Image: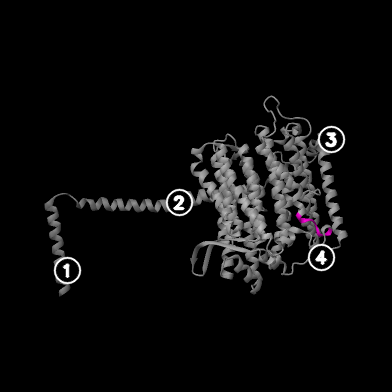
Amino acid sequence: MTELIYLTVLLPLIGFLINGLFGSKIKNEKIIGTIGSGAIGLSFIVVLLILIETLGKPADQRVTIVTLFQWMKVGNLDISIAYQVDQLSILMALIVTGIGFLIHVYSIGYMHGDKGFWRFFAYLNLFIFAMMNLILADNFVLLFLGWEGVGLCSYLLIGFWYDRKFEKSTTASAAKKAFVINRIGDFGFLLGIFLIYMTFGSLNFTEVFTAANHIPVDESVVSFIALFLFIGAIGKSAQIPLFVWLPDAMAGPTPVSALIHAATMVTAGVYMVARCSIFYAMAPTIMMVVAIIGLLTAMFAATIGLVQNDIKKVLAYSTVSQLGYMFLALGVGAFTSGIFHVMTHAFFKALLFLGAGSVIHGMHHEQNIQKYGGLKKYMPVTFITFLIACIAIAGIPPFSGFFSKDEILWYSYAKGNFLFWLIGALTALITAFYMFRLLSLTFFGKERFDKHHVHPHESPKVMTVPLIILAFFSIVAGFIGIPEVFSGEGGNQIKNWLAPVFADAHSKKITYGMPSHFVEILLMVISVAGAAAAIWLARHVYLTKPGLADQIANRMKKGYSVLLNKYYVDEIYNKLIVQPIYKVSDGFLFKFTDVKIIDGTINRTASLIDLFSNNIKRIQTGVAQFYAIIMMIGIVIALFWIIVSLI
């Protein structure tokens, strides 16, 4: 069954080709939606069957390379279209195809009546095709092909409603912003790939990682490789300083936000760093950089989420913050915990975005939570599922977010860095607060919308059923990672499953203090109690005393303004980077270099040729006698030259 892994890549490509080439002619939304969703559903079934087959194999026989054909051979560089089926790629494939299928089904209802319905499903299928190449690739070149493919699809889907306004710009501008910023990170990624080839003479995962594990390599070289790869991850996974594209990506349709910017694409950077864990284990300084960047991003984005009023913007900054948590895990060497959080986050964040989409759909595309209120009675299914997602992301047991978040905090503490644990725990409290602020303002309290023009209603079943399924997994998914303090030695199933993938990295002396179980449980209790207190505070501020929030905002005007304007990062970037580049490009490169030097040189060359040709053409008089005289003069000159040369 494993040999059929190529079907998980091929089926989305077929769906893209059918809807892309014939969708405008098919026109029937049910057929288009069935083709798009069916392609991903079948891919999920194939991955599920491969998982079942793999579970029946011994742990040391669970890695299979499926080679389709040789792609290129240049000198020593031999690249094939080949897929690596192992514990990590199977888990990621299940996330991408499983959640991708639910979002495709949801989109049938959400995008109903849209003039680009067929185009939307074609783009979604193309995205899944690119993402599957990324996570299944057995070499860096194919991984980079998928990496760039998801970037292209992100551009197409963010700017899907290219003719609509988004804040102060257009959706097309938001798409361009995402595309350009990702190119910065991709440049670093390419440098990392080049350095890998120069160092190891190969770009195949197995060959490179084996060589890195057994052949002595200068630590500075490995550090540069790890750093360059991490720069690529910073761009794709929206970390400081390249995070500004992701909140603007909310300009796209809500299913895009759920699929690309919550559950799959933005975790590509996390996956790539985890796949290259051996490099980071060999470069402890870069691991510390990864942890610090992740921690700062988590806290930074969480504080911004405290005051945002656009329902999707709150979730966008929440995504940036949770991605920071994942990199914190990778930075302290808890690679399994980082991937575990990728999985649990995929469920509850996709649920949050789809729940937000259901609210937006029911509120006639209004996204300002200050204009919601009391929607609980109008949208009971959306409310219950959204509540479950909020509890999960807040880290309340036994919901999934608790297990993965607590594991990250525990390893941060066990690594011997109490400050990491403290900032991480504080970030978790802020997360619980702003998520229940969002829940309270949306579903509770008095109705603040215009009842004459807005008529809230529950979404159709094609949208609510995916919500229910995601809610179920948001509750139970964490149980595959029960802490060993409760499950005993070897009781953490996801840790056991992924252990072979990270065995080489952990062999590089990534050690932990591992305090007593009492300390572990105590920190767990403190974290949960803090999250519960933050939830109570959010409800107290926004429901029990609804005027209190405005009072706090008035007392802290400057701080509130800074958070509301996202620390003015976009404005700073615009003033220090964008505008100077624009001025240099327009004033020097265009008006001087292009117009005066390049165009001027070409134009002057043309003028000289024109002048020369105007004089030459006078020889062409059309008079035969004149031509005869010229011929005679030429003959005389030629004879004279011959005679002189003979003397």
Q: x, y (%) of residue 122?
A: 54, 44
Instruction: Tell me how far mark 4 sits from mark 3, CA to CA.
Output: 44 Å
Identify the residue at horizontal 82%, vertical 61% (top origin): 488
Name the image colouring: one colour
Instruction: Tell me how far mark 4 sits from mark 1, CA to CA.
Output: 98 Å
Judged from the image, the secondary structure of the residue bearing numbered disc 3 is: helix
- Residue 40 visible in image: yes
Q: x, y (%) of residue 110?
A: 63, 37
Dot placed on the residue nearer the N-terminal end, 4 or 3: 4
Screen quadrant of the N terminus: bottom right
For the record, the magenta segment spans 480-485
Q: Amino acid at mark 1?
A: Trp
Q: Which mark is residue 641?
A: 1
Label 3 packing within 10 angstroms: few (<14), some (14-19), many (20+) = few
Instruction: Tell me how far mark 1 sits from mark 2, CA to CA.
Output: 48 Å
Q: Amino acid at mark 4?
A: Gly
Dot placed on the residue nearer the N-terminal end, 2 or 4: 4
Q: How many marks?
A: 4
Label 4 packing within 10 angstroms: few (<14), some (14-19), many (20+) = few
Judged from the image, the secondary structure of the residue bearing numbered disc 1 is: helix
Is residue 210 or residue 319 the one in the foreground? 210
Q: Which residue is mark 3?
A: 544
Q: Which residue is mark 2?
A: 594
Identify the residue at horizontal 43%, vertical 53% (top origin): 597
- Mark 3 or 2: in front is 3
Q: x, y (%) of residue 324?
A: 71, 53
Q: Which residue is mark 4?
A: 513
Instruction: Tell me how far mark 1 sits from mark 3, CA to CA.
Output: 111 Å
